[in-house]
Amino acid sequence: MTEDSAHRLSDADRQALFAHVSRRRTSEPKPAPAKVVAAPEGATDFTTLPGYKELQTQATFAQMIGLKSPFFRVHEHRAGHETLIGNRVLANFSSYDYLGLNGHPEVQGAAKAAIDRYGTSASASRLVAGERPVHRELEAALAGLYGVEAAVVMVSGHATNVGVIGALMGPKDLIVHDELSHNSIVLGAQLSGAQRRSFPHNDLDALEKLLAAGRRQYHRVLIIVEGLYSMDGDWPDLARVVDIKSRYGAWLMLDEAHSLGVLGRRGFGLVEQTGVDPKAVDITMGTLSKTLSGAGGYIAGSAALVEYIKTSVGAFVFSVGLAPPVAAASHAALDVMMREPDRVERLRRNGKRFLAAVRSHGLDAGPSEGSAITPVIVGESLKAAMLSDKLGDRGFNVMPILHPAVPERLARLRFFITSQHTDEQIDEAARATAEEIGGLVGTADVMQSFAKGLA
């Protein structure tokens, strides 16, 4: 039957034809129903995820006693040494803007000019879709800072550690890191499939004993330390770490995330602080989100290392390139930092002043060296949360660090100092902290017992 003859069918013939086709379809065997596999109870319920019940219990208890959550506070303008929360101006001790460059006219101007020229996004991976001059200019400046051959920037500091560590090491290798290493270092080590060992914080005797006992079992060994530990505000003996890595044939990775702009006469980090040759560090990692007022991470080192990262590390190859305005802003911030070393000197003075003030009130600042980070250790998570709340009422924004981020007995407030803080803000913050801790004695212990009862 042709298409033309079908159009000439009568209405009756057409209805008969449709009925015949319909009967054929209904007589065909139906497919068997899809098999349903019963999942374990709670397997599709997000509220059964580990830790969720504990979170809900904590939130309920906090609401019962009128304790405001210290997390996810909304800052209503630029958060530097001061911030605006709930229409109140607070002295801010929870900012990584160590040199006060976030909002600097040159930094903002560079970002705005980059938006006008390139838009707000790189839109795709740099490997397959190309890059912008601002990427190469920032990378060249970072390589120059450390006196090494090359550098590469990525969109996330966390992903930089995870991706690079995960790609460089493998099942025949060993990764050794400080026990207080950042989460991104631990996850990168796990991703690599290498054996992983940690040593007690800054205990380089333990590091050497570990390598002496097991180095021969592995092909490559990577030692990872941080330039400034973000929970305690201290740093390792870098010269000795370099000596150990050289004698045991290992790579050394130095995470300078918090030390750039903070340590060293010009703010060049732990390498400058300790006088170590930057080329003695095989892999230097850093972030753009702190001193450099952007977002993202970077690796600096040999040309071969950077070439490998640009073609083999998934966090770079399969991720969008750094947003051009961010690259331009971070480059401008680096220029200002290098041109104005007095900012670094003011930060150093402020950090020492705060540490001295805290200790003069008998507070426990742990091993802090008085740089940009000083903890006040209070001992229990609830006490730290209550203290943060009390200080907020008095005009100071400072965040608590609670279990499991630190052991319960080491819960703390963590003060970040900037070059812009005034002497009055520093002295008053230390004094208010001491006064409020005194007022919590007994009250927090009762509340802690009540909370355990609820759990």
Image (tube, rainbow, N blue to C red):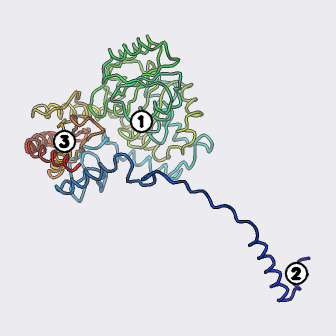
Comparing 108 with 393, the one in front is 393
Location of residue 243 by image quarter:
top left
Q: Which mark is residue 422?
A: 3
Q: Helix, strand, or loop for circle 2? A: helix
Q: CA distance from mark 2 to mark 1?
A: 70 Å
Give the mark toward the camera: 3 or 2: 2
Residue 220 or residue 136, whichever sits in front:
220
Q: Please, what is the three-letter code of the amino acid marked with disc 2?
A: Ala
Which of the two labelled residues, at mark 3 and mark 2, occupies the earlier sequence position?
Answer: 2
**What is the C-alpha distance between the residues marked 3 and 2?**
91 Å
Q: What residue would you read off at disc 2?
A: 6
Q: Which residue is mark 1?
A: 184
Task: Answer few, some or many: residues within 10 Å of disc 1's Cα (few below 14, many 20 plus, some between 14 and 19).
Answer: some
Horizontal and vertical percent for residue 17?
83, 81
Q: Nearer the viewer, residue 156 or 149?
A: 156
Nearest the eye: 77 or 186? 186
Residue visible at 44% across and 18% down in the picture: 280
Local SS, label 3? loop
Residue 88 sits in quarter: bottom left
Q: Label 3 sits on what residue type? A: Thr
| Circle 2 Cα neighbour tier, 10 Å, few/some/many (<14 / 14–19 / ≥20) | few
Q: Residue at x 30, y 19 (%)?
A: 203
- Would residue 397 be found to the left or right of residue 242 on screen? left
Residue 74 at x, y percent in the picture? 30, 55
In the rendered image, is residue 331 in sight? Answer: no
**Quick check: can you spot residue 306?**
yes
Q: Please identify the quarter of the rendering in which residue 199 is found.
A: top left
